[in-house]
């Protein structure tokens, strides 16, 4: 049975002279040739969110930096955050002497028990679409010294500005001053133990490269990354070899020309000997 389940014993030669098992090859029904992942063309159909399964156009996904606007990941463990409801008592606007219950929402992680209340995010009136996000302070900064819009206002071309900046000779730089005296450290650095639990790990900082928080209390929910639905196409006749359904929740394929369904399969097995009365 182990030999029957092992598909790597027999390998088929692809059109590009590479060897793969039959389950890793495609058969183009138009040019009648075997195709593998290297000689077939991979195309991106549409981005989608793996949690809410919502399709998104490529232009909108690029505008949102390939992230879903309504789904969030836990900044501590990376699992998907779920929205939980709670009730708050607020004064009645008609009668201030009485109180009424108002439904509020907050996000929590079911794996590490992290909540948005741990970082001081207030509860929201609606479940989705109103969570505050951090703004990058360097987003509007001119990173190249002179923006294209500013050069256009001045009537200068980009190449002329580059030649003018290269011709400038930098002046003499002032030497840095040497500091001999420093403020003494407080006794807390020597007496109290280091709270390494409150500091973030390297993976936490790489998940938010524009902020790179150093403390756990500064972590905020992260918008979930989008995934791509891909399709395979023959490079010679440009016909589809594999194309998934447009609905992300469906596991069916519109087109699936795997070689396992069309090419005869060869297996290597030991010959069995038959004995009478046994």
Image (cartoon, grey):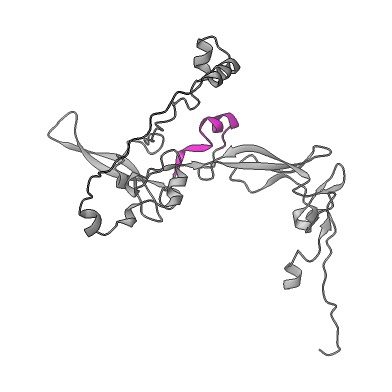
Q: Is residue 14 above or below residue 49?
A: below
Report the magenta residues as a range.
Answer: 55-72
- Residue at x-position 83% and y-position 61%: 265
- Residue at x-position 53% and y-position 12%: 152
Q: Residue furthest top?
A: 155
Q: Is residue 111 above or below residue 60?
A: below
Q: Nearer the viewer, residue 234 or 139?
A: 139
Q: Quadrant of residue 254?
A: top right
Quick check: is 192 in the magenta stretch?
no
- x and y percentages locating residue 53 in the rendered image: 54, 42
- Residue at x-position 82% and y-position 67%: 267
- Residue at x-position 75% and y-position 71%: 3
Q: Count how many numbered circles sit on residues in the image.
A: 0
Q: Nearer the viewer, residue 252 or 49?
A: 49
Q: Is residue 174 visible?
A: yes
Question: Where's the N terminus, which quadrant?
Answer: bottom right
Q: Quadrant of residue 138?
A: top left
Q: Is residue 78 visible?
A: no
- x and y percentages locating residue 179 in the rendered image: 29, 40
Q: Nearer the viewer, residue 217 or 178?
A: 178
Quick check: is 64 in the magenta stretch?
yes
- x and y percentages locating residue 164 in the rendered image: 55, 16
């Amino acid at each position: 049975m182990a030999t029957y389940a092992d598909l790597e014993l027999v390998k088929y030669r692809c059109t590009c002279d590479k060897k793969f098992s039959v389950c890793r090859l495609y058969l183009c029904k138009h040019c009648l040739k075997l195709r593998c992942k290297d000689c077939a063309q991979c195309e991106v159909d549409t981005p989608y969110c793996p949690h809410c399964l919502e399709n998104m156009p490529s232009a909108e996904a690029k505008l949102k930096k390939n992230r879903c606007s309504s789904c969030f990941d836990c900044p501590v463990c990376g699992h998907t955050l779920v929205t939980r409801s709670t009730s708050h008592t607020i004064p009645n606007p008609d009668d201030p002497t009485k109180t009424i219950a108002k439904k509020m929402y907050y996000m929590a992680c079911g794996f590490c028990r992290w909540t948005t209340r741990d970082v001081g995010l207030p509860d929201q009136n609606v479940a989705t679409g109103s969570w505050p996000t951090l703004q990058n302070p360097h987003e509007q900064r001119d990173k190249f010294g002179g923006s294209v819009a500013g050069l256009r206002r001045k009537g200068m071309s980009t190449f002329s500005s580059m030649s003018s900046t290269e011709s400038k000779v930098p002046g003499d730089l002032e030497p840095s001053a040497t500091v001999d005296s420093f403020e003494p450290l407080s006794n807390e650095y020597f007496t109290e133990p280091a709270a390494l639990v409150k500091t973030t790990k390297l993976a936490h900082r790489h998940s938010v490269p524009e902020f790179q928080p150093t403390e756990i209390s500064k972590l905020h929910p992260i918008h979930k990354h989008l995934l791509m639905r891909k399709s395979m196409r023959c490079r010679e006749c440009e016909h589809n070899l594999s194309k998934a359904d447009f609905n992300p929740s469906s596991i069916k394929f519109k087109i699936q020309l795997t070689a396992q369904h069309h090419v005869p399969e060869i297996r290597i097995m030991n010959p069995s000997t038959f004995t009478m009365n046994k």
